Amino acid sequence: MAESRLRDLDQYSCSICLDLMKNPVTIPCGHSYCMFCISSYWDMDKRNNCPQCRQNFGSRPVLNKNTMLADIMEKMKDTKPQAASLAQPEAEAGDVECDFCTGRKVRAVKSCLECRASYCEIHLQPHYDFPALMRHKLVNATFMPTCQKHDKLLEVFCQTDQKCICVLCLMDDHKGHDTVSCAKEREKKQLKLEADKSKYEEKCKEKEKELYKLQKATASHVQSALQAVEDTEKAFTESVTFIKKRHSEVIERIIAQEKADLDRLGDLREQLELEIAMLRAEGDVLDKLLQTEDNIHFLQNFENMPNPSGVQDSPSQSLELDGSFGNVSKAVSDFKERLEEICKQEADSILESAVHGESLIVSFPGHEDWKGDLSEMELVTGDITPGASTQKRSIKVGDRVRVKLSVDTPKHKWGRISHQSVGVVKGKACC
């Protein structure tokens, strides 16, 4: 039943727009169309024939509204089949809409430059079926550009005013101007754009080569930095290990020397204690004789008393215990100071060689805040003649500098300076 109803509705569809007829008219051969559709068809075809049976009427027939058919169309509006329309994609924001679909907005697939209308796949079909419409110029669906003044297609390009105009503008505001068709002007400008595109592609390839070199240099630089960190770590670790080893050797040597000295002092102490005991014993003999009251006994034993002059002094083997290792402490302190100074000097030298890519902000006459690479700059003394620069110390804020004569093109470009320009360092660049 539904199929039968659809076939009935097809009888009342305009064969040009494929929609239910609006303001239906019937031409002499008996076929009916929308008044707008058949009028537009005859405006374009100029032969005043029927699109379906091809009957030619000579002069254009007068079109009168078919009131009975119009009443039927009015009653059938609500029963119009939507299946074909629903099967097509709906127009979204920015899409060109079909000019013949009613109700639901369907996305157009083609635009006709002759009809100045856009069509969905269903309403485009007559342009493929009818010979008169087959000759029309179809393009991808686009918003039809029209002249705001004459409401005509913009088909002409005015080279004098460099703008698109319609054919009526040729007889009006652009009379006497140099004009060509938009298609011909497009061909001309397209050649230029294609040439420009080729240049952009060439520049893009050059930039890609530079990017590749930069990436390769970056990878090499990162690898170099990693190797430098590894070598530095190894060197400093080995240095610390060496110092610790020498430290242990010195401590062991001090302890061994201390033990040897203490052993010698122990032997000397024992000898001295023995000699003191012997001297005290002989002193007791003398004291005992001194205390006797018998003169005869004193005189008879006097010659047998021990004589102090006969006591042989042992060679002095004493050591200066207080501060005996003071020379070692002083030597270690001096070594520490020399080592720190050497480490500082060498570390500063290493750091200076590692930050060769640091950038500076320099104020030159006529070019404030010029950015330059540290490795490209040199200090300048009062004399700025060639060779009058010095690199005996590192560059710091406030120094007068210039670009080295050996630098052909600075990393950050010349700007408004030259090899003869002398500027003052304002600080390091943040990036």
Image (cartoon, rainbow, N blue to C red):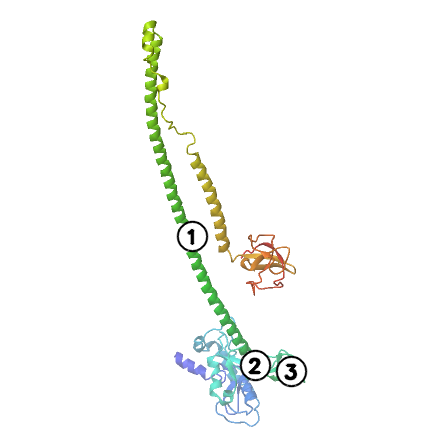
Circle on res. 182? none
User: In which quadrant of the rendered view does residue 187 lie?
Assistant: bottom right
State which mark lies toward you, 2 or 3.
2
- Residue denoted by label 2: 186
**Three-letter amino acid code at disc 2?**
Arg
Q: Residues within 10 Å of mark 2 (few under 14, many from 20)?
A: some
* 388 left or right, relative to 233: right
Point out the tag, 2 or 1, that comes first from the N-terminus.
2
Identified at 37% across, 38% down, the residue is 251
Q: Nearer the viewer, residue 220 or 304?
A: 304
Identified at 49% across, 72% down, the residue is 205
Q: Nearer the viewer, residue 38 or 172?
A: 172
Identified at 36% across, 9% down, the residue is 290
Q: Nearer the viewer, residue 172 or 13?
A: 172
**Three-letter amino acid code at disc 3?**
Cys
Circle on res. 232? 1
Disc 2 to disc 1, how far (Cα)?
Answer: 66 Å
